[in-house]
Amino acid sequence: MLVEVAVAAAVRGTFTYRVPPALTPAIALGQRVAVPFGKSRRATGYVVGFPAEAPDGLALRDVTEVLDRLPPFTPKLVELIRWAEEYYLVPPGELLRAALPPGLNARGGAAGPARRGVEYAAPEPGAGDALPSLSRSRAQRSVLEYLLARGRIPVEELRAAFPNGRPALTALARRGLVRLEREAPVARGGLLAASAAPPELTPAQAAALEAIAGASGAFAPFLLHGVTGSGKTEVYLQAIARARAAGRGALVLVPEIALTPQLAGRFRARFGDEVALLHSGLSPAERHAEWQRLRTGEARICVGVRSAIFAPVQDLAIVVVDEEHEGSFKQEDGPAYHARDLAVVRAKLEGAVVVLGSATPSLETLENARRGRYRLLELPSRVDDRPMPEVELVDLSKLRRSGRDVGAGLVSPRLAEALAATVAAGQQAILFLNRRGYETLVVCEACGEEARCTDCAVSLTHHARRGILLCHYCGRTERMGGRCPACGGPRVGVGVGTEQVEEAVRGLLPGARVARLDRDAVGTAEETAALLARFARRELDVLVGTQMVTKGHDFPGVTLVGVVLADTALALPDFRAAERTFQLLAQVAGRAGRGADAGRVIVQTFNPATPAVSCAAGHDYAAFAQGELDRRVRHGYPPFGRLLAARVEGSEAGARRTAEALADAARPALRGEVAMLGPAPAAIERIRGRTRWHLLFRATSAQALFRVHGALARVARRPPGGGAVRFDMDPQSML
């Protein structure tokens, strides 16, 4: 027997090996094997084919070992990964290696733990009285606070919220503060017992469900466009229940499971032990155990982040991509694949339904629906007919021109008044600003020289509580009190970050309970979950934060959302800047009014007439999308064109030399149908001491870009200036 093997290394092509008779019974497509590679090296490889004949003139070597009893990849997964490697210009074997969970070692990894039913945790009566006594055990206090906010929940939800929280939970149970219970799930047509029975659907939800279920058994792509709070998740759950009732599997991709652990709890409560989770909050051994449960068919539903697109779900019937517009579905480090787009390809290969859900669909997905490639399903209103929040724009430029003080921390009089009224009424508010730190720009008062990182081409941000200037790319710090290196003058901070907004709110509302949620205030998933639990229990009045406050949270007590500055992303050198601004504003506005009380949103901006801002204020996705699509078609940007980025990193002279060599190699292959932008320094020219150059190629077809890549490959293999060249098909970031 001969096998075609993709070696798990950044090498071109695949390699043919012989299979010794003793190993032949264990060989299958997708199998992991050990093979001799090079002069004296042993490498891990993956069986991707069975050649009928050996290549001419080559002496073949033997496979030395089969590494798994069961191939980690199904034949359909091998087909998907090989397609992805070809499309995303990734060396064979590299994506196969990246697709496996880290817990799978050379001997097949750890065995998965035995599971019997769903384990639940609940706080005992009076447990809240013990919180003061837990002051020395931060982990136990955080877990108990979360349980007090959420009540009885699956332990799986706690594992998502507190990746290292199991010892704390066990300790709380020993102290009699928490009750642990295990229930055997009772299957009922793909659903659990009546205690977990699904709610009644709205007419729009029911119509969407019937359309999805009616397409079962064949490839069918859907865009589920539903406003925030319209019940998209319930449609997913009931569509998956229909698939399970037919004995088939399901895959659900979410952008950031650590920020929405409730989702894990909802799926476990509905489907019990049939759900396997794949995300970074699990240990390598746990991730491998979940992978094995899927591979053996013990678990038939997978919920995970982008890498879960390669999960070995058996007999796949439905793929769901929740918040499909999110940029985190694009892998930026390592093999540059897009999980949302691969979800569509996988569904096509496996004859499954794929549902892309969003309140603010990406323009690529919307255009596919407009062209009839995807079927559009709409949920135009919130569940229980709760109204969308009223949005008010505050024009900061008018305030400045009128001489009125915008206020410390960029809190306008109108926003300050609304905050005071909200807190006085016993309700909650969220303030959003997508800038960390206290002041986002520090300059010399004498000469105007900007404080910049010496290793990265970015400004240093002032963090007042720590008294430092911090680079958010490499972590380099300086003392704020230092003098200007150019002239010795004093430094002064300008611009506003979340730290300054938090301070301003505390000054405006001395009695309010205020907290901040950003990567500086909460460094771990446990800290994030604990802070959100306090907010859910209404122990906090105002939550100030970055994008972390916008992602899928459901707080019934929030009646006011304030956007401190809506313009932060509009000036970025990225053709998607307006789209991302609209999506972010729409998502954060959707946090208001999700309970019994109506919500309102105050958006502060210097550009109230900008479509991304004005359309978000009017909840008018259609108007924004049409205007943005009109602009894109004029310039040939996606969804009306295809892009390929060539990214170069190296020394200052070497990166430039390599980028220019790539441009020279590309010109003969352009043939008038491919436009080349660059070579030019990247928008952020230097990160961690490495200089970055970019080339961007634009065409109407992927085939034309593949031809250009072929012309660039020789230069990329041996860059004349040293460094590294990385290709990115369908790039999402222009920075």
Image (spheres, helix red, strand yellow):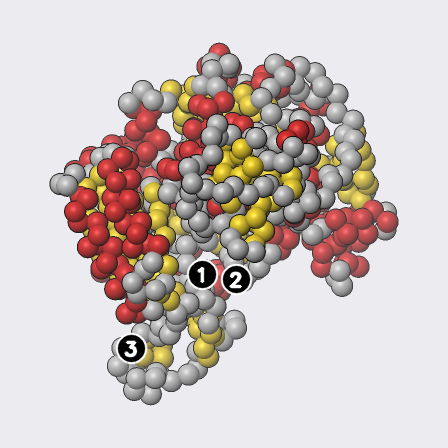
Image position of 4 (left or right of 489): right
Q: Are marks 2 and 1 in contact (CB under 8 Å)?
A: yes
Q: CA distance from mark 3 to mark 2?
A: 26 Å
Q: Position of residue 678 (x, y in %)?
A: 21, 55
Q: Quadrant of residue 226?
A: top left
Q: CA distance from mark 2 to mark 1?
A: 7 Å
Q: Earlier in the sequence, mark 3 or mark 1?
A: 1
- Whether residue 663 appears in this view of the structure is yes
Determine which residue is flagged by label 2.
520
Determine which residue is flagged by label 3.
449
Mark 3, secondary structure of its residue: loop
Q: Report how many numbered discs are placed on residues in the image.
A: 3
The foreground one among 326 and 430 is: 326
Looking at the image, which residue is at 19% across and 44% down?
Answer: 669
The foreground one among 395 and 315 is: 315
Image position of 416 (left or right of 406): right
Compared to residue 178, the image places residue 621 above or below, namely above
Looking at the image, which residue is at 80% across and 53% down?
Answer: 130
